[in-house]
Amino acid sequence: MAKEKSSLKVKLPFQVPFFREEAKSAAQSKTAPPLLKFCVVIVNWDKVQLVSKLLQEKEVLFHFISKGRGTATSNILDILGVGAEDKGVVICLETAALAPELLRAIREELHTHGPGAGIAFAVALSAINTVILRGFKKKRGNVKILTNEGGNDMETIKNDLIISVVNQGYSDEFMTTAREAGARGGTVLSARGLANKNAVKFLGVSVQEEKEIIIILAKRDKKEAIMQAVSRTHGIASKAEGVIFSLPVDSALGLSS
Amino acid sequence: MNKVLLEKISEAFSSVLPITAIVLIASIILVPMPGSVILMFLCGAALLIIGMGFFTLGADMAMTPMGEGIGAQLTKMSNLILALCVSFIMGVIITIAEPDLMVLALQLEQALGIWVLIVTVGVGVGVFLAIAVLRVLAGVPLRTLLWFFYLITFGVAVYMFATGNDAFIPVSFDSGGVTTGPITVPFMLAMCVGVASLLGDKGSQEDSFGFVALCSIGPILAVLMLGLINNITHVNAGELINVPVLAAYTDRDIALAFLEKFPHMVREVSTALAAILVCFTAFQLITRRYQKHQLLRITVGFVYTFIGLVMFLTGVNVGFIPVGHFFGSELAGSNLKWMLVPIGVLIGYFIVTAEPAVHVLNKQVEDVTQGAITRKMMYTGLAVGMALALGITMIRIITGLPIMFILIPGYAFALLLAFFVPPIFTGIAFDSGGVCSGPMTSTFLLPLALGACAGVGGDMMRDAFGIVAMVAMTPLIVIQLMGLIYKQKQKQAAVLKEKHAAVLAALTPAEIGHITIYEEAAYG
């Protein structure tokens, strides 16, 4: 099961400007590699274009958009079909120094466009392809690297990102359990399992397993309870065959006012 | 208020209000209508709004997941023969239950037995649904199949035209649009996405469209063949032409008109939905794909779809047919005949959002392309297509131009375009032909054309009936032209990419493969 990999179906809506200038001079740059953050913005689908535009304005080197769906706040609403909204998941990389500012700018932008917009958070990278990193060096070569600089209005409470990969069709029940254990909301992405051993061939094309990735942002003190609860009901031993893990998230912002 | 609900309500309003406003304004300026007819029209529009809201919500909750589920499960079967048999049977059942097909059959009752036509068309759709599934699995380009089948279709049509059996041609082409109704279309659209979704190796996006496209050919070919074999030279247009337009409807008459139609619609919609329900229940019992929570949601969605369609169809059948007919005949009969063309274009442009399946297609497109092709783009493209269709039809009615003179170059152009646009646009375009020709077309545009035809004094069968065929054809061209523009934009992006590629080419493999690993302290 450890071999399980899920591929987000990401689509590049525009070209990727890796390099704005020649890469050669960047190679000679003597500054320490800037620490990068993996930034994730989850907003209502109709706000995705706004975020995308803002990221381009801020000269973020590239970003990817994937469509997911939100989860309802209650079972009844969901069964009545008015619970969940479509969500867009926008992911990008930004230097650690600029990431908090970027997230804040996104909040400002969405704030003027009504409440209930979504969440944004950043996760530190542990390694990166050097060629890509050069793009960042070139672009922000002079910015002093600041670590653990959270900014004042960032939530001081630590958050964790709980990521779960379950079999297709189990995300609704999964979220019910998670909510009971204290989760406030989540986002579901459709994915394909690429467990290559079991891939069935059909007319020479491999048929892949359907999976659902559930992303839940939770306060650190709630994390364990949620993970325990969902592991019990939808863990690896259940029909959902859930793989559940969490990542530390260092700057999380609610985008709603 | 609940946000999703609010969104649906505003969507429903903005879909139906524009066309209502256009018709009202046009009627005040050009053809003053009796107040009672207008009242009926407004009641119909109100039902349409409610119906549209429920339908789109229901389609999201029930039709789409059901179709996708069945499609995905078909792929998982890993047994080609079984998968094809299942799709064939489903195609037949769903088509036979389609209420629009019954209407078509009744029109041709005198020429053909009702069941002969229904079963032939059903088998036609079944065969083509199986072909469509096979196409995705075998990875044959949609273009190839479209070329092949349209060549056959037009071969037969031209032969009939040459031998003087051309009375049957417009009806055949109409039947392609007619059989892909508001229940079949969302279901087939979703099924296609489902089948394609698991074949991740290559081009699953491109393969996510094309079921409706292929399934629209089935009925055309089937009906043409029937006409050819039975050597039918004359077709009676049936009951549709005799639309009673009473100037002196009382409020009670109006209420009665709606109430009388209501049980009829309940019956029609339940037959059609029952067919899908049967397929789905069998499917769920065998595969156990859905969990309790989802099943509940699908059930509620099913109920919504039912309510929505009954409301919508009642509203459109009672409220819109008389206005359409009255409007067309009065305008064509007056000395403002030429006004039919611009008014037709205007109506076409705004009616597209009132076609329920259009919303389902546009959402599907946005979902599959992850927003690269937006809903707005699709609405604009379809609106332009519809406007074009109405404009051409009105010109045809006024001049009496044979339909083949437009259909053949139109389809030839559309098929040629398929070589130049990104494949996904071909799939979407040929699907949207079936999507646009829904209940709004048959209950408002068709009576409008029939009325106009009666006013001008043309041949109903030859001139008016081609409108559905026209509505099914123009989006093929417009959406593909949109694809051309899109491709042009992609080319511009490709230039930039090449620049990057040049920089990357200068790097050694070691440089490209080099990974910078951060000190653990840096990231905590």
Image (spheres, rainbow, N blue to C red):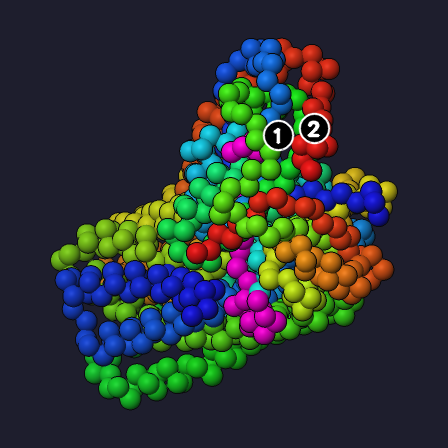
Q: Amino acid at mark 1?
A: Leu
Quarter of the figure with residue A188? bottom right
In the depicted structure, whether residue B256 falls above or below residue A161: below
Q: Amino acid at mark 2?
A: Tyr
Can you say which quadrant of the picture contains the C terminus of chain A? bottom left
Tag 2: Cα neighbours inside 10 Å, few (<14), some, or many (≥20)? some
Magenta span contains residue A252:
no
Q: Are marks 1 and 2 on the same chain?
A: no
Q: Nearer the viewer, residue B207 or B11?
A: B11
Give the residue pinned by disc 2: B518
Q: CA distance from mark 1 to mark 2?
A: 7 Å
Q: Residue at x 15, y 62 (%)?
A: B30
In the depicted structure, whether residue A222 falls above or below residue B495: below
Q: Residue at x 60, y 10 (%)?
A: A28
Q: Report helix, strand or loop for mark 1.
A: loop
Q: Is residue B97 left or right of residue A164?
A: left
Q: Nearer the viewer, residue B429 or A35?
A: A35
Residue at the extreme bottom: B252
Give the residue pinned by disc 1: A35
Quarter of the figure with residue B261? bottom left
**Residue A60: x %, y % from top left:** 50, 32
Q: Report helix, strand or loop for mark 2.
A: loop
Q: Residue at x 62, y 20 (%)?
A: A32
In the depicted structure, whether residue B260 falls above or below residue B404: below
**Residue B254: x %, y % from top left:** 30, 83
Magenta span contains residue A83:
yes
Q: Nearer the viewer, residue A83 or A23?
A: A23
Disc 1, disc 2: CB below 8 Å?
Answer: yes
